[in-house]
Image (tube, helix red, strand yellow):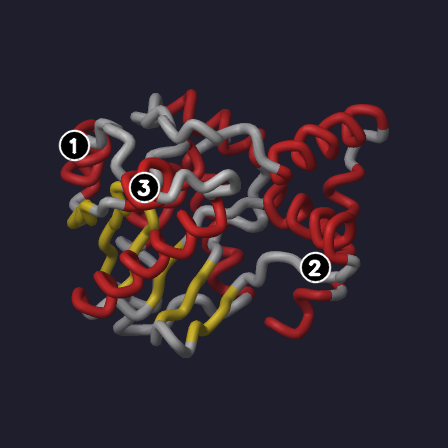
Amino acid sequence: MELKRLYSLTRQTLDEYKMIEKGDKVAVGISGGKDSLTLLYALAGLRQFYPEKFELDAVTVDVGFDMDFSKVEKLCDELEVTYTIIKTEIKDIVFDKREEKNPCSLCAKLRKGALYSKLNEMGVNKIAYAHHKDDVVNTFMMSLFYEGRIQTLEPKTFLEGADITVIRPLIHISEADIVGFTNKMNLPVVKNNCPVDGSTKREYVSELMNQINKDTPSVKNRIFTAIDKGIYKDFK
């Protein structure tokens, strides 16, 4: 994916769901993965010419898995984006002290708590997450499979308890396009050292949908179109 296309699709999403307003202070949630780094690149570029002027920061919650974010810090310097790393003891709590058999839920809860507290301190009013089109489809299928509900990731959500609005500017971009952009730009992806990374229900559904899409080409695009015309119509 070319940089121009990344800007175009991201801006389309920002406009369609009115994600950014003049004077917003937006933070990109940086995990170190390809998705969040692509989002960082997109918003850093759009900040220069988007009609609704906004501030941009980048924030990482360091869970404690000895991950090296120095190259991400260098990228943020190049993009002129202030980068904050929030140090936590989440790994010690979840994996060492409590020895959780299913750690993902508690880990996510603690990460969000640390993140939202820091964002309030920084005066940030919107957090941008890097969920893409495949994430939307996979979450929709997970809700059907495991909960018997029709729902998925929302484009824009106000979290009253945290006083933060979540936005997802990459929902019109496929994971394949993000992989292509990451490789083209040689983005400094940080390896996830979490011991349960890649062994979750989400990963299972992702692999299943990739196989279905291989057997029935473009099925994921058609599912996303159905979501866009159904669930997402109330957000436009």
Residue assigned mark 3: 97
Who comes first in sequence, dot 2 or dot 3?
A: 3
**Residue 225: x and y, percent?**
74, 53
Do the residues under discs 2 and 3 have CB atoms within 8 angstroms?
no
**Residue at image point 48% right, 44% down:** 104
The front one of 154 and 177 is 154
Bin the neighbour count of mark 2 within 10 Å (Cα to Cα): few under 14, some 14-19, many 20 and up. Answer: some
Name the image quarter holding residue 55: bottom left
Bin the neighbour count of mark 3 within 10 Å (Cα to Cα): few under 14, some 14-19, many 20 and up. Answer: few
> Image quadrant for the C terminus?
bottom right
Q: Which mark is residue 213?
A: none
The front one of 98 and 36 is 98
**Residue at image point 52% right, 57% down:** 13
Residue assigned mark 1: 74
Residue assigned mark 2: 228
**Residue at image point 46% right, 31% down:** 2
**Residue 180: x and y, percent?**
50, 25
Give the CA separation, mark 1 to mark 3: 34 Å
Give the CA separation, mark 2 to mark 3: 43 Å
Taking 168 as reference, is 91 left or right?
Answer: left
Do the residues under discs 1 and 3 have CB atoms within 8 angstroms?
no
**Residue 1: x and y, percent?**
50, 30
Residue 168, placed above or below residue 74: below
Amino acid type of the residue that numbered disc 2 sits on in the rendered structure: Asp
Amino acid type of the residue that numbered disc 1 sits on in the rendered structure: Lys
